[in-house]
Image: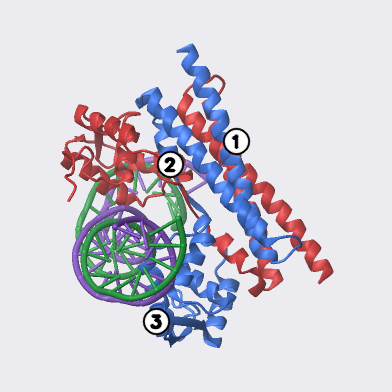
Chain colours: A red, B blue, C green, D purple
DNA sequence: TCAGCCATGTAATGGGTTACATGATTGA
DNA sequence: TCAATCATGTAACCCATTACATGGCTGA
């Protein structure tokens, strides 16, 4: 029985640290955080439901990693602003230093179908491939828009670095769908 | 209230069809299927625990999509061979025709950390990046080995197409890690 | 008029992971 | 000797999704 070290992260899931980390960019409400996460983390880490963002925030408060402040509003519903605490920042830094590199996982139901392409009608497969190309082009456009929002200059350095990963991969995907379409059409011509 | 069509897939998750689809390449035991899935689907769809493969197979039998045959062995433990049924094949084809293109999701805890790189020590970040490069190179080597196993010629067409996706993306990742390392070192030099 | 945005949550379900259990054979 | 392989499963847990609930304001 190996003795556990006095819980540096208490076995919290990476998603908790993801939400905590977003708070380092400034205080935010659950609603705002959810929107922010969908513009950023959703492309390479996770796409949480709104309700999950809210429950993660409650957990952060329970752990003492964040504080809440009720803000009353006239024209909009009241909201709760969450702010990271010094304890939360220490926990985040400790996690960043200690967590190592967990492998990336990819889940593409589309590629699964392509692998079973021999069982599909060529029409459906081609339609799916066209749709995959459209999605890749759209996703690429979204990321290029993010890139423009950053403007010129090197900062913010790290978010830019992550964005460059997304851009490279979406260009790769787009190129692949185009090559795949050519191959499908060539194959259809040969019967 | 839109009326649902008389359950063409009974709301089964894609993972069930993934296992079912692997059975179209031939009968197999849970143990063999698990190994096969880890050599193939794990790179772009899912990496199930052994126990999940077994439970999916039991579900397929319960649904009438597969049959089991107990096979006694002398030198090895007995095993159960699973075979897809005509009903199972119809269900699989129906799913392939009807399921459309669900978006790909990527989960990279590493990229999450890079995004918060400003909070990390440069040493840890660089070590993580080196590790990420090593993993990408290793993964690429695994896929290139799969490619060699296929040999020359166009067949099997669809598995090859999926493999080419994996190869392209791992080359992109490898290239990105190398560029990122250069940028990190350049930045460290400038302080 | 009416969809969409702002804003926060509860409840139920289940897919997927981790840990545990068993035990013989093979090869380094 | 000892790790790895072959082979199948149970039990517990929990992250994550889906559905549901509420309701005022804004802009087309």
Residue in view at x 61 percent, y 57 percent: B146
Disc 1: which chain?
Answer: B
Return the residue at label 3: B78
Instruction: Give x and y (percent) for residue B61.
Output: 42, 84
Helix or strand or loop: what does disc 2 sit on? helix
Please state which of the two labelled residues, at mark 2 or mark 3, is closer to the viewer.
3
Helix or strand or loop: what does disc 3 sit on? loop
Q: Looking at the picture, tell me which residue is in the foreground, B71 or B4.
A: B71
Image-based side of A144 in relation to B126, left or right:
right
Does residue B117 sit above or below D4 in this rendering? above
Disc 3: which chain?
Answer: B
Instruction: Give x and y (percent) for residue B63.
Output: 43, 84
Residue B121 visible at all: yes
Does residue B87 sit above or below B48 in this rendering? below
Q: Quadrant of the C terminus of chain B?
A: top left
Helix or strand or loop: what does disc 1 sit on? helix
- How many C-alpha atoms fall within 10 Å of the one at disc 1: few (<14), some, or many (≥20)? some
Q: Quadrant of the N terminus of chain B?
A: bottom left
Please state which of the two labelled residues, at mark 3 or mark 1, is closer to the viewer.
3
Return the residue at label 2: A41
Does residue A10 sit above or below B178 in this rendering? below
Instruction: Give x and y (percent) for residue A117.
Output: 64, 68
């Amino acid at each position: 029985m190996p003795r556990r070290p006095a819980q540096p992260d208490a076995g919290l899931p990476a998603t908790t640290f993801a939400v905590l980390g977003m708070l380092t960019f400034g205080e935010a409400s659950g609603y705002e955080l959810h929107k922010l996460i969908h513009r950023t983390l959703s492309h390479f880490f996770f796409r949480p439901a709104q309700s999950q963002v809210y429950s993660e925030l409650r957990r952060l408060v329970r752990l003492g990693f964040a504080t809440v402040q009720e803000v009353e509003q006239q024209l909009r519903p009241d909201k709760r602003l969450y702010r990271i605490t010094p304890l939360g920042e220490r926990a985040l830094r400790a996690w960043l230093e200690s967590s190592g590199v967990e492998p990336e996982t990819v889940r593409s139901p589309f590629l699964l179908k392509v692998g079973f392409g021999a069982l599909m009608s060529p029409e459906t497969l081609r339609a799916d491939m066209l749709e995959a190309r459209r999605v890749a082009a759209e996703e690429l456009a979204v990321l290029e828009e993010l890139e423009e929002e950053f403007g010129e200059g090197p900062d913010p350095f790290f978010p830019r670095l992550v964005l460059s990963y997304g851009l490279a991969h979406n260009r790769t995907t787009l190129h692949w769908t185009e090559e795949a379409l050519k191959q499908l059409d060539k194959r259809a011509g040969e019967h």
